[in-house]
């Protein structure tokens, strides 16, 4: 009887024209407008390109970027960039930044891994000094380029310059410069070994480098014990030395009089909770930071954090109180093998960076931060999921702005994402993150969520900013729910079993890329249907004072692509329909 009654109610709503209304996605978008930020990305992956564009536009900025070929990374056997290499064009990027300065730009977010090494991946593999030739024939080393660029951008006191950098991870990238998985595993084990701890006046670049080859007890580590040859360790440590030296030079240069318009944000790349080769590097770099700088876990979220922080500082952000609730029981542990701190510590450091005051769940705060961790007890996974979903729905009912982080590292399988899709209003969230490595999800979710909350306080919304915000949230949810946990698993099996190829590089061996793309498109069409329906029937917060909501319109996905011709991540375009009046729900059925 209950099912019949609900069906009758739904039929009445549909017959009276009150069914959930979907607006058709538009072919043209309103112009973003706003102040310009000159941005040199870490590389050409979606989290460093289109998602940064969305975030910037959601805050009223326009992001200026170089041509994609200038910052693209190519894996082994893939077509080279126009500069004839696998990495970005440092000379052209240097000249691009100076061109932006000549036009009067005064906001910059610049990846030093890209400007000085041609991208994150190449920075891990490069042991020698790089030399570039400018368009006028002038030659510059990487260190000279750094000095020249910083001097040029310091001349205009109106410039605000964010320099993004990284602590080199424990091993280079597989599938680049001939580097293989066995070498990766061996070098990562070598890098994870403790080194003699340096403190105080002994904490210098020279001493850190001198101890690279020593174990925690001061005895030399034998490369053969890790299955490595001497020359492999030599190249690895030379790349680390180059990377650390360049970062140290940047920090030293920034200390000069007249260089006060620089802010530094350093990310810790794939790490370990062990006292690894990174420990002294991290301690040294932290000791060199000035007020306003930061060294935080995560690298692929650096641009998100810089854009958000730039906006907060320009608009007089006074901080906010955030209530934090963890579900799963393992928040006091690292979220995965690549974190160097417990999840609670990483959340706390990012909260401090964004001037957030954290409270436990008993205090409602201004925002809610809900975090799903790995399950402490496998038998209780259902209870953890249900508790989080209940909390999320309570926040929705009470109109509390909410950030959701999935730090479970995939331990709840697809059932969790299905439950969220069926039982919650996904489009109501301030932000969501769960797709990339666990070291990155905290910074991604908090930067987007805090930026959105601050922007709502400013009352400067336009159609363009609202659409950029919605696109940001849709991108994050769809890629995690639909691609990572459904379609990618199918693709991995298809590529390896049916095509006999590598999911890590569609060019090595040369593979039927059209077939892979077709499989992606059909898979995403099926996997995204319920999530898109949820979003299209969701409301989002459009004002805090007075509190107001708007209804999502239609959402269409198109132009799927594999930025690095590998299955790990995808890019896609998101078209949106006009927003609607707030959707309403009766007995769980939406109508408007």
Image: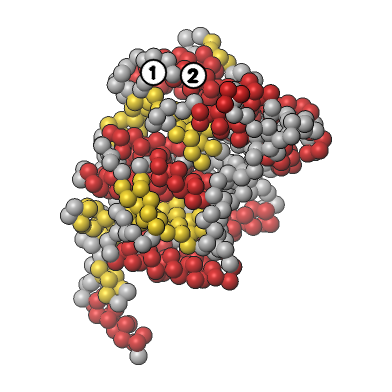
Verify CB contact (< 8 Å) between mark 1 and mark 2.
Answer: no
Q: Which residue is mark 1?
A: 259
Residue 474 seen in render: no
Residue positioned 58% across, 22% down in the render: 201
Question: Which residue is nearer to you in this view: 590 or 238?
Answer: 238
* Residue 526 in the image: above or below residue 177: below
Asked where in the image residue 222 lies, by quadrant, the reply is top right
Q: Is residue 539 above or below residue 304?
A: below
Image position, residue 301 (x, y; %): 46, 41
Could you say where residue 316 lies in the image, as x and y percent from the top left?
Answer: 26, 37
Task: Work out whether residue 332 or residue 452 is closer to the camera in this orientation and state it.
Answer: 332
Q: Residue at x 68, y 34 (%)?
A: 195
Side (left or right) of 175 relative to 264: right
* Most distant residue in the bottom direction: 1
Q: Residues within 10 Å of mark 1 (few under 14, many from 20)?
A: some
Question: Residue 481: image x %, image y %?
Answer: 48, 59
| Quadrant assignment for the C terminus | bottom left
In the picture, measured across the screen, residue 111 lies left or right of residue 472, that is right
Residue identifier under label 2: 252
Q: Secondary structure at mark 2?
A: helix
């Amino acid at each position: 009887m209950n099912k019949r009654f609900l069906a009758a109610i739904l039929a009445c709503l549909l017959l009276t024209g009150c069914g959930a209304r979907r607006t058709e996605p538009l072919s043209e978008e309103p112009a973003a407008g706003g102040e310009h930020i000159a941005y040199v990305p870490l590389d050409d992956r979606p989290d460093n390109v289109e998602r940064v564009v969305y975030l910037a536009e959601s805050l009223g900025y326009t992001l200026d970027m170089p041509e994609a070929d200038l910052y693209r990374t190519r894996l082994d056997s893939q077509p080279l960039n126009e500069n004839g290499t696998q990495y970005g064009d440092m000379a052209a990027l240097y000249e691009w930044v100076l061109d932006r300065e000549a036009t009067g730009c005064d906001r910059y977010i610049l990846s030093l891994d890209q400007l000085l090494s041609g991208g994150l991946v190449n920075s891990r593999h490069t042991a020698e000094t790089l030399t570039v030739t400018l368009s006028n024939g002038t030659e510059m080393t990487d260190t000279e380029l750094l000095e020249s660029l910083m001097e040029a951008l310091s001349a205009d006191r109106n410039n605000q310059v964010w320099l993004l950098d990284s602590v080199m991870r424990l091993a280079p990238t597989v599938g680049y410069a001939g580097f293989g998985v066995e070498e990766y595993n061996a070098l990562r084990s070598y890098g994870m070994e403790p080194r003699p701890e340096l403190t105080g006046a002994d904490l210098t670049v020279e001493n850190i480098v001198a101890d690279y080859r020593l174990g925690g007890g001061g005895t030399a580590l034998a490369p053969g014990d890790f299955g490595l040859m001497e020359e492999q360790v030599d190249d690895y440590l030379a790349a680390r030395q180059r990377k650390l030296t360049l970062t140290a030079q940047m920090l030293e240069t920034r200390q000069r009089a007249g260089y006060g318009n620089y802010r530094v944000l350093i990310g810790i790349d794939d790490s370990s909770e062990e006292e690894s080769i990174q420990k002294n590097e991290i301690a040294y770099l932290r000791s060199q930071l000035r007020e306003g700088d930061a060294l935080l876990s995560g690298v692929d979220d650096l641009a998100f954090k810089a854009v958000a922080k730039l906006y907060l500082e320009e608009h007089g952000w006074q901080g906010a109180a955030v209530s934090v609730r963890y579900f799963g029981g393992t928040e006091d542990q690292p979220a995965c093998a690549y974190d160097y701190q417990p999840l609670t510590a990483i959340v706390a450091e990012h909260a401090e960076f964004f001037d957030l005051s954290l409270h436990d769940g008993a205090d409602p705060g201004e925002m809610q931060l809900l975090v799903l961790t790995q399950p402490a007890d496998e038998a209780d996974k259902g209870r953890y999921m249900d508790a989080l979903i209940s909390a999320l729905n309570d926040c929705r009912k009470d109109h509390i702005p909410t950030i959701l982080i999935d730090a479970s590292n995939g331990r709840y399988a697809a059932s969790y994402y299905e439950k969220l899709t069926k039982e919650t209003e996904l489009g109501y969230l301030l932000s969501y993150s769960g797709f990339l490595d666990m070291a990155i999800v905290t910074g991604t979710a908090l930067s987007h969520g805090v930026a959105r909350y601050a922007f709502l306080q400013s009352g400067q919304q336009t159609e363009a900013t609202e659409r950029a915000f919605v696109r940001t949230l849709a991108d994050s949810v769809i890629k995690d729910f639909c691609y990572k946990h459904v379609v990618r698993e199918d693709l991995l099996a298809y590529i390896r079993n049916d095509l006999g190829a590598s999911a890590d590089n569609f060019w090595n061996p040369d593979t039927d890329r059209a077939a892979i793309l077709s499989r992606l498109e059909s898979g995403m069409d099926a996997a995204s249907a319920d999530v898109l329906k949820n979003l299209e029937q969701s409301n989002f917060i459009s004002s805090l004072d007075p509190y107001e909501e708007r209804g999502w319109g239609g959402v269409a996905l198109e132009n799927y692509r594999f930025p690095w011709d590998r299955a790990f991540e995808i890019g896609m375009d998101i078209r949106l329909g006009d927003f609607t009046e707030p959707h309403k729900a009766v007995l769980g059925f939406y109508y408007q």
